[in-house]
Image: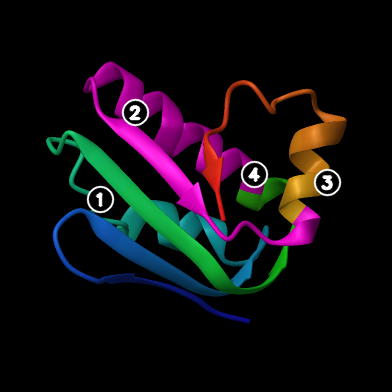
């Protein structure tokens, strides 16, 4: 199980693979998101599997972005993560786009 974060242009990134307890710690350590930008867009279309650790990572990036006064948008969120967001009552906190 692996996950990759690939830059795709100015302040755009693509996550691919499994966003799980097994992969999130390394991704968190290695991720180099540009929180100095006005807005960051992270595309999750290629995430195959996600669990609550994946949600925790997205929330942590959201926290860091807010402190840096940066807007972070998650695109093409997988159904598993969408369900976790809804069950947790976080729809108003996490900005999602298709």
- In the picture, measured across the screen, residue 81 lies left or right of residue 43, that is right
For residue 15: magenta? no
Mark 4 / mark 2, whichever is N-terminal = 4
Residue 97 coordinates in the image, percent (x, y): 53, 48
Tell me the CA gap for discs 2 and 3: 23 Å
Q: Residues within 10 Å of mark 2 (few under 14, many from 20)?
A: some
Q: Residue furthest right?
A: 87
Q: Secondary structure at mark 4?
A: helix
The answer to whether the residue labelled 1 contacts the one labelled 3, judged by CB atoms less than 8 Å apart, is: no
Mark 1 / mark 2, whichever is N-terminal = 1
- In the picture, measured across the screen, residue 77 lies left or right of residue 69, that is right
Q: Residues within 10 Å of mark 4 (few under 14, many from 20)?
A: many
Image quadrant in which the N terminus is located: bottom right
Mark 1 / mark 3, whichever is N-terminal = 1
Residue highlighted by disc 4 = 55
Mark 4 / mark 1, whichever is N-terminal = 1
Tell me the CA gap for discs 1 and 2: 10 Å
Residue highlighted by disc 1 = 33
Q: Give the residue displayed 32% in from the left and 31% down from the top.
A: 71
- Which of the two residues, 97 or 74, is positioned nearer the viewer here? 97
- In the picture, measured across the screen, residue 73 lies left or right of residue 47, that is left
Q: Give the residue displayed 12% in from the left and 35% down from the top.
A: 36
The answer to whether the residue labelled 1 contacts the one labelled 2, judged by CB atoms less than 8 Å apart, is: yes
Residue highlighted by disc 3 = 83
Residue 43 coordinates in the image, percent (x, y): 45, 62
Tell us which disc is closer to us: 1 or 3.
Answer: 3
What mark, if any, has residue 64 been given in the picture? 2
Q: Residues within 10 Å of mark 1 (few under 14, many from 20)?
A: some
For residue 56: magenta? yes
Mark 2 / mark 3, whichever is N-terminal = 2
């Amino acid at each position: 199980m692996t996950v990759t974060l690939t830059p795709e242009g100015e302040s755009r990134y693509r996550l691919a693979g499994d966003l799980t307890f097994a992969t999130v710690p390394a991704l968190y350590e290695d991720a180099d998101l540009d929180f100095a930008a006005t807005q960051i867009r992270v595309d999750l279309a290629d995430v195959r599997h996600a669990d609550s650790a994946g949600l925790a990572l997205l929330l942590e990036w959201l926290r860091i972005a807010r402190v840096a006064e940066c807007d972070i948008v998650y695109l093409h969120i997988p159904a598993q993560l969408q369900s976790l967001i809804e069950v947790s009552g976080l729809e108003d906190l996490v900005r999602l786009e298709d």
